[in-house]
Amino acid sequence: MTKSLAVLYINTHHKDGFYVKEANTSAKSFKMYLPNAKYYLYTDYEHPIPDCEFDEVIPYKFFVPEHLKDRVHLNGQMIVKHAAMQQLSEDRVLLLGADTYALKEQVADLPNILENFDIAAAHAPVRINTELGNTPIPEIPAAFPELNCDLILYRNSTEVRDLLSQWGELYIEDKFSHPHDQGLFRYLVYHSKLRLCVLPPEWNYREHAHREDTVILQNRFMLTEYTNPKKGILKRMWSR
């Protein structure tokens, strides 16, 4: 039996809908390789999306509690993310940041990882982020670094939803006083019994050096370099 797949985006109205429009471009790129998935957008953007790629646009209120006002995502996007990830009914879910872009046909094979794993994500480029006032959570070995929480593929199982529920609750409780939610996700995955697949960096590539083997790019500043190399070269020349 074919398992259903949801592709999920959570983006606010800020910057005149820039992130919503960017997510729409991302969805279009993933549809090339995952055409049978159902594409969702949770947003507070109130205007029509030109050439909308989403099957469902779900209006949602974004808010930030007073005790979290100093966090990185001041628009409340993380809080909505934790909730939205638990609300879909598909067998598998692929959460994506707006600035992701599918580049190669290998993307079509990505959901198959969940035949043997419960959750998949790539290491965060900054393996354990302490630059924003984060504590390193010393009870977790440094050999188990943070995972990038802008691309998470997971089984929509009771066990995974339990972890997502804890993630949302402990984020609101401000368990570690981290500006971001990745340290908390690291803590919960480490203490769980979930089978984790760590994706290679080219499957969630965030750096600035061009890689020919990049499958999924997450770097809006490098997108032209990958999708239109000639324009990328000209851009670099003009910026000198």
Image (spheres, grey):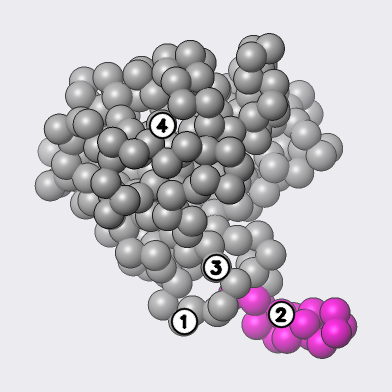
Q: Is residue 210 above or below residue 109?
A: below
Query: Does label 4 or label 3 sit earlier along the sequence?
Result: 4
Mark 3: few, some, or many residues within 10 Å (few <14, many ≥20)? Answer: some
Element on which disc 1 rests: loop
Q: Quadrant of the N terminus?
A: top left
Instruction: Give the residue drawn at x 18%, y 35%.
Output: 194
Query: Does label 2 or label 1 sit earlier along the sequence?
Result: 1
**56, 131: nearer the viewer:** 131
Element on which disc 2 rests: helix
* Spatial CA span between label 2 and label 1: 14 Å
> Residue 120 placed where, x, y %?
29, 47
Element on which disc 4 rests: helix
Q: In which quarter of the image is the C terminus?
A: bottom right
**142, 85: nearer the viewer:** 142
User: Which disc number belongs to residue 232?
Assistant: 2
* Spatial CA span between label 3 and label 1: 13 Å
Nearer the viewer's eye, disc 2 or disc 4?
A: 4
Instruction: Give the residue drawn at x 64%, y 14%.
Output: 67
